[in-house]
Amino acid sequence: MKTHHSSDDLNTDTPILALGGEVNTLAMARHLGPKGVRISVSGEHGCYALSSRWCSAALPVPQGMSSHDYWFELLLAPGADRYRDHIVMAMNDECCRSSLLR
């Protein structure tokens, strides 16, 4: 028997940091943003979710910097604690292969 959960059951206290992705990241932002989940997105220029109204913080990878290096700075560099309480979601293959997740 399937249990149906309403959006009222969704705990929106923990923000999300989505790394990479394209339409999948946008779909997540469009789905969870209106429910009150704070979603920060980091990706290459052209990542659709970076310009979504449901994106609470857009963190484009700077020109000339690899996404891996930028995400390391965001998450693991000394003093990088701004996103410590976020759920970090790997939204593309590049992020999944990154040594950040090893």
Image (cartoon, grey):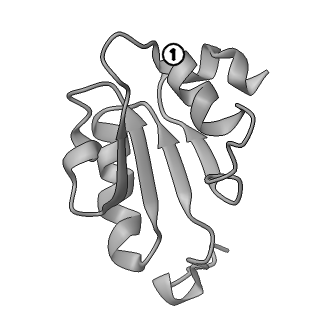
Q: Residue at x 70, y 31 (%)?
A: 77
Taking the image as drawn, is residue 93 in sight? no
- Considering the image in quadrants, where does the N terminus appear? bottom right
Left-right relation of 98 to 22 = right
Q: Height in image: 79 above or below 67?
A: below
Taking the image as drawn, is residue 72 in sight? yes
Left-right relation of 27 to 38 = left
Q: Height in image: 13 above or below 96?
A: below
**Which quadrant would residue 29 be assigned to in this image?**
bottom left
Left-right relation of 44 to 46 = right
Residue marked by disc 1: 94
Could you say which is closer to the camera, residue 4 or residue 96?
96
Give SS at disc 1.
Answer: helix
Q: Residue at x 46, y 67 (%)?
A: 38
Q: Height in image: 19 above or below 15?
A: above
Q: Position of residue 25 (x, y in %)?
A: 37, 43
Could you say which is closer to the camera, residue 7 or residue 47?
47
Q: Residue at x 56, y 64 (%)?
A: 15
**Which quadrant would residue 79 be assigned to in this image?**
top right
Mark 1: few/some/many CA within 10 Å (<14, 14-19, 20+) = some
Q: Height in image: 59 above or below 45?
A: below
Left-right relation of 73 to 48 = right
Q: Residue furthest right?
A: 102
Q: Position of residue 94 (x, y in %)?
A: 51, 16
| Amino acid at dot 1 | Glu
Q: Residue furthest bottom?
A: 8
**Number of numbered discs visible in the structure rendering:** 1
- Considering the image in quadrants, where does the C terminus appear? top right
Q: Residue at x 20, y 28 (%)?
A: 46
Q: Position of residue 5 (x, y in %)?
A: 56, 81
Q: Position of residue 81 (x, y in %)?
A: 69, 50
